[in-house]
Amino acid sequence: ATVDDGTVVKTDDLAKAQGIPPQFLVDILSDLRTDRLVRSHRGRDGGYVLARPAADISIADVLRCIDGPLASVRDIGLGDLPYSG
């Protein structure tokens, strides 16, 4: 799902957009919240919002959150390797 930075997205809407079970998404979002990649908002209009601009969150940040520390390649951490694509 693509939304503007700062937009609160409901868990059910995000789960439907990504085609995954809502409870599985809740578990992922909980990890992302613990690592301060997303913030949660309670209430009827609640949901999740990125904690910082999407451009400032790397794939390595998300992988570290979900899977733990990344391995290094030739003494360069994977989070420090350039990527263009």
Image (cartoon, rainbow, N blue to C red):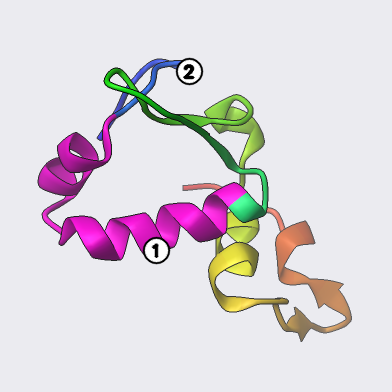
In the rendered structure, does residue 45 fall within the stretch colored magenta?
A: no
Where is residue 12, by image quadrant? top left
Residue 21 falls left or right of residue 28: left
Write the start and end of the magenta stretch as one range: 10-33
Percent of width and height locating residue 65: 61, 64
Residue at image location 57% in from the left, 77% down from the top: 67
Rendered view: 71 above or below 61 = below
Residue at image mark 2:
5
Q: Is there a contact, CB below 8 Å, between mark 1 and mark 2?
A: no
| Magenta stretch, overall SS | helix
**Of the pair 72 and 56, the residue shown nearer to us:** 56
The disc at residue 27 is: 1
**Of the pair 40 and 76, the residue shown nearer to us:** 40
Residue at image location 23% in from the left, 40% down from the top: 14
Residue type of the residue flagged with mark 1:
Asp
- Specify few, some or many for label 2: CA neighbours under 10 Å numbering under 14, 14-19, or 20 or more: few
